Every structure is written in structure tokens, then in C-alpha cells.
Image (cartoon, rainbow, N blue to C red):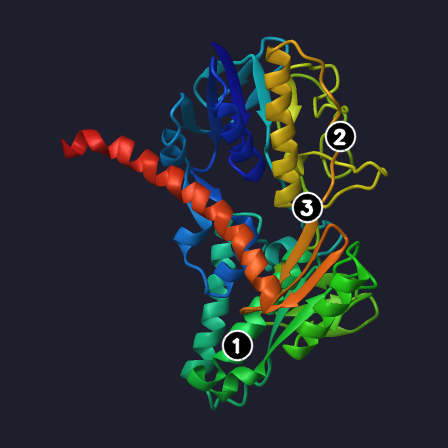
Amino acid sequence: MKKIIVIGGGYGGLRAVERLAGIDGLHITLVDRHPYHYLQTEAYGYIAGRFDLHDVAIDLKNWCFGFKNGVEFIHDEVTLVDFENRTVHLSDKKLSYDYVIMAIGAETNFFSFIKGLREYSHGVKKLQRAFDFRSSFEKLLYTKVEHPLDEAKGELNIAVGGAGLSGVEIAAEMADVIKKHTKSIGESTRDIRIHLIDAAATILPGMSDYIVTRTQERLEELGIIIRTNAFIESVDKTTIRFKDGQSLEYFFMIFTGGIKVPSFALSKEVEKNGLNQFLVDAFMRIPGETNVFAVGDCVEIRDAKGNILPPTAQTAERSAEYVANAIKEELQHRELKPFHASIDGVFVALGGEYAVGEMFNIIKVKGYSAYLLKKLITYTYYLGLKLRLNTGFKKRTKPFED
């Protein structure tokens, strides 16, 4: 029986477990310091109040119980991966392994050169941060409902730092909620202004002209104020100051402007980039460690042209699928083929039932049809999680029902 340990219950970790669970002769252990899988791609809807907590969190213990073969979940912190002794150290015990897959993800990079950024802004990489931001957004709406005639407050600004995929989707969803509910919440919600801020020359840097142009049109239609080439110098409790001397008073701020991989204890130094991402070989292995793989956001992944791919759920899942298959091939003593990373398509949720999408660099869609396609992709993933979750819950609770 081969022992495989998967560290991290994000998109990559779960996909690796799914693919490995169907292989005979394996015992799989999933380890995460959180007891849930966080659907971070749905953070925009959760923050704006369109989704509830059960839409973005999946219990990992029940999910693991949903497999026919042995999949174990351990809710604990990994303190060390010991390559020499092939062990993973937890807070109070050690686990031996034949293979380990590091799917530890990434966290928001609150740049240290921007004074006050960490203290006064929210990220969305963690469920707790998303919850805090949702509470702040609802508090703002409540303020306008409770005090609609309070002219002293005037405009209340929401600042979204970072105009990448997450920042754009969150800004659009909040703007759509405000716009749609003006009748019921009150005209005073028109005083809420959303500012989308990025140091780059354009929103969604690195994406196609079609995606960028159609997204900008939608954001402007929603009344979002786009600030590009805007370099934030400092943030305090009430004000964002820019390097050009301008400033913006704000009610609350979210920051999605970058990622970094959290510190992780290994028994030896390994090569990483400036974001603390692992630099792996062509087979997604830590160089020099034939039985240690890394997938998802914690890895610098490049396409065939050498371009670094953005850290998306799609890339995480693709890399995890490759690694699961690579382990299967090794167990059958077959030669491994290098991992070829690519992105088949991108969909951007832009508030309500509207999206923009592009597939295979050929198919381009916008509006309701793009929303339906994005929803189908998301629902298929969510349904798969839920079905396994329900199976696992029934298996765990059945002894208590008899």
C-alpha cells in the first residue's frame, strides 16, 4: 500500500485527491489547517451578498468520506516536510509518505512598501477576510438605509486595490447589487462610489484586448470609477494617498493586487522565485526530489512559450491532474512526459447575469450567454463537490441513525 499525502485543500489539492482515489493500492491523506475547502472563485458573489456561506465552503472531512477507497482527512498544521526521512510533521505526530503533493496555495501579498496596506485593507484569499469584507459592505448598505438623509456623510467610497480578475469581479458584483437594489434600499445608495485602482496601464493586465475592452465597457456602465496608472503610497484608517499627490477618502478597502506563497518549513532549501513560489522541473517535482510534487498557486507555472500563467483554479486543477497521472505512470514503471500548461479560456463575472468570456482564443461571448457558460462551469464543479459531500455525510452519520 503506497502512502500519498496531499498538503492543502484548495482547488489543486482536491483535484489531486479525486484523480488518485480511483487508483488501487493507494492510501491518500489530505491535510489542511482549515476544516473546509474555500471556493475562492465565488468570493465576488459571497462578498456582495448574493451567495451564502454554504455556497463557498465545503467540509473536507465529509468530502473525503465520500470516496469508496481510503481517503483520510486530517485537520492540522503541517510544521515540516522532511525529504530525507520521507515524513510530514504535524503539530503532534509524523506521517510517513511514498509521495507528497504540496498544494499549499497562496495568500494576498500586502506589499510592505505601501505603508498601512496590511492594517487597513482586506484580502479575499482567506474565508475570514472575505467574511470581514462582506460584513463591511453590508454595514455600508445598512448605513444608507438607516440614515438616508444624512447629507453630512455625502459620498462613501469603496476602494478595490488591484484590477486583476478578483478585483474586477468583486467591484462589478458590488456595483450591480447597489444598482439593482436602489429602489428597495433607497436613493441614498447612489452616494456609494466604487473605485477600482491599479498601478498597471490597463485593467486585467495580460488578458486579451477583447476581454479588456468589453470588461471596461461593463464597469463604466455600472458606474465604477477606474483608476489605472495609480500608484498607492500609503493607506490609513480613512484615506488612500497616491504617489502623484492625490488622495481618496474611503469607507473600506479590499486589496487583490498580488499574491505570495506563505512560509513553509522544508528539511532543505529549495529554489523559489520572488513570490516564494516553488520552481519545479518539467514534471512538477521539486528538483532533486523524485517523489515530491507541487501544484497550483504555490508553483511558478509557465506555458510552452515561457510565459508565466496567472494563478487560477483552472491552472491549479490542470497541474494536479498531471501530477496524479504522473504518480500513476511511475507506479506502473512508465516514462513520464513533461507537463504542458495552457489556459483554454477565461470568463469574467461582471455583476448579476452578465459576464465576458473567451475560449480557445476563438470563441468570444459577452452578456447573458457568457454568464450562462460561466455558471455551467462553476455549477458542474460545485455539484461534484456536493454529491461527494452528501455521500460522505451519510456514511459518517449512518451509525448514529441505526
Q: Residue at x 56, y 67 (%)?
A: 173
Q: Position of residue 103 (x, y in %)?
A: 59, 32
Q: Residue at x 65, y 9 (%)?
A: 333
Q: Is any atom of residue 77 visible in this view?
A: no
- Amino acid type, residue under disc 1 in the picture: Ile
- Nearer the observer: mark 2 or 1; the answer is 1
Residues under numbered marks 1 and 3 in contact, where contact means CB atoms less than 8 Å apart: no
Q: Secondary structure at mark 2?
A: loop
Residue hosting label 2: 272
Left or right: residue 232 compared with residue 188: right
Q: Secondary structure at mark 3?
A: strand
Q: Secondary structure at mark 1?
A: helix
- Nearer the observer: mark 1 or 3; the answer is 1
Left or right: residue 369 compared with residue 345: left
Q: Position of residue 156 (x, y in %)?
A: 58, 78
Q: Position of residue 347 (x, y in %)?
A: 65, 57
N-term mark: 3 or 2: 3
Q: Which mark is residue 178?
A: 1
Q: Which mark is residue 259?
A: 3
> Marks 1 and 3, how far apart in space?
29 Å
- Amino acid type, residue under disc 2 in the picture: Lys
Q: Quadrant of the C terminus?
A: top left
> Marks 2 and 1, how far apart in space?
42 Å
Residue 246 or 371: which is nearer the viewer? Answer: 371
Residue 325 or 157: which is nearer the viewer? Answer: 325
Q: Is any atom of residue 389 visible in this view?
A: yes
N-term mark: 1 or 3: 1
Count residues near mark 1 (Cα–Cα under 10 Å), then give few for <14, some for 14-19, many for 20+: many
N-term mark: 2 or 1: 1
Count residues near mark 2 (Cα–Cα under 10 Å), then give few for <14, some for 14-19, many for 20+: some
